[in-house]
Image (cartoon, rainbow, N blue to C red):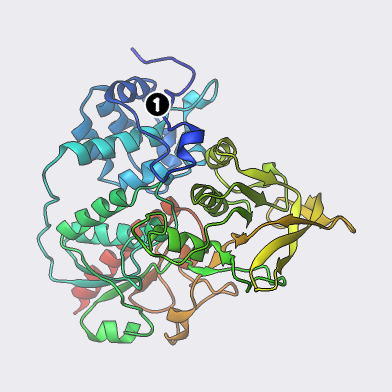
Amino acid sequence: MPNMTMTKTPMPEQQPDVRNHNFEEVALGYTEEMAVGEAQRCLHCKNKPCVSGCPVMVPIPDFIAHVANREFEEAYQVLTTATSLPAVCGRVCPQETQCESKCVRGIKGEPVGIGRLERFVADWHMAHSQETPARPASNGHKVAVIGAGPASLTCAGDLANMGYEVTVFEALHTAGGVLMYGIPQFRLPKEIVQKEIDGLRAKGVTILTDMVIGKVLTLDELFADGFEAIFIGSGAGLPNFMHIPGEGLVGAYSANEFLTRVNLMKAYRPEYDTPIIRPKNAAIVGGGNVAMDAARTAKRLGAENVYIVYRRSEKEMPARAEEIHHAKEEGIEFRLLTNPVAIHGDETGRVCSIECVEMELGEPDASGRRRPIEKKGSNFELPVDCAIIAIGNSPNPLIPSSTAGLEVNRRGCIVADEETAATSLPGVYAAGDAVSGAATVILAMGGGKRAAKSIDAYIRGKAKTE
């Protein structure tokens, strides 16, 4: 009998006044009983609408059916037919706007907790399975993958499963991309990411770090080294700024730099001597998930007052509802309809305040959100010692600028076919944030899957004509 409870099984969490002082994971995960109960809420619809909402087409009802029958390892095997990173997706995917938004149970109540169940299954497998993934037999063909973020890891994993000899070239000293440097430990433990990466290595994927493609090697040199196709998943790691006075002061950061120092350089751990300001009062400019991450991180570093400064209302915020909810619970103050116009410093060149103006909403702009309009004469100052700009990122221009014939658009994004991920250069494919600009992990993974399929078809087709 299905479980016809109208609401999701609640996810156990650390209490807000406890978790905002530590970097341990906020959500504690389902027990087996909770997972089985939630899985039994699934109606196993004949047309499977939830699958249509998943960018990587996970066979959702199938894995959930196994959970309902307490067949947790079988559920994991179903998951991994579609995703190389289930423990990651279960934590950071915006399920509420994707698979869960299509769930029939959501019409008269809450949808099935698909993301929570995916996380449970992946975590259960990691805790109980001692087997390492089998290395597929090699087909003798070599593919280069640039970047080690979610798009690249997905592409590499799918190609490895097909028998390709895959080498990943990562610019930083650690693989994982935004999963490692961007998303905080309390949302996505780095140990989880590392286990997923170790699984890819076990399948035969070679990961080379400190390899800045465009400087150390060019795409032409990779082809000359015997790689038959190249995938570019270099992400969008170039931070955008507001170009207001004071962005160069000590204590003014891009969200990228701030989060990289905390996450990748381990500033949150006392045994690491990572240079970073531990603010008393911090202002974070922006309304997306990255802004929430930066604000919640600043709070955990000891800030007494943390402000989200956003020029529109909460309704227009692009951050996940869950992230906004958690930030409010943890004591983050939202200064909405507010826009910075300058960052001020003291006599030593350190941030001492951020000057803002009040805004009001006008007619919708090209994005569909109402355009913010400044209220003249409404200037005021927030006393802060740290200002973090979290208004988005752009792709790094290094690879396009060092590669003749690689087409980019006016935003600096690599132009690639939406279905095949093919670029303007034969044998070169691209997906993820390098193509779309900053987006979600799961959309990047979907692009990586499409690229792997296209690369396989390209190499097979080329082999037939030779």
Q: Quadrant of residue 341?
A: bottom right
Q: Which residue ends up furthest to the top in the rendered image?
A: 1
Residue 267 at x, y percent in the picture: 41, 59
The answer to whether 176 is drawn above or below residue 221 in the figure is above
Q: Taking 98 as reference, is 45 left or right?
A: left
Question: In this rendering, is residue 408 above or below 47?
Answer: below
Q: Residue furthest front?
A: 347
Residue occupying image coordinates x 24% and y 38%: 76
Q: Nearer the viewer, residue 177 or 37?
A: 177
Which residue corresponds to mark 1? 45
The C terminus: image quadrant: bottom left
Q: Residues within 10 Å of mark 1 (few under 14, many from 20)?
A: few
Q: Quadrant of residue 239?
A: bottom right
In this picture, is 322 found above or below 228? Answer: above
Q: Amino acid at mark 1?
A: Cys
Q: Position of residue 163 (x, y in %)?
A: 16, 62
Q: Nearer the viewer, residue 403 or 360?
A: 360
Res 453 visible: no
Q: Find residue 233 and report its horizontal and vertical position in percent.
A: 39, 67
| Total marks placed | 1
Q: Quadrant of the N terminus?
A: top left
The residue at 33%/58% (across/down) is 271
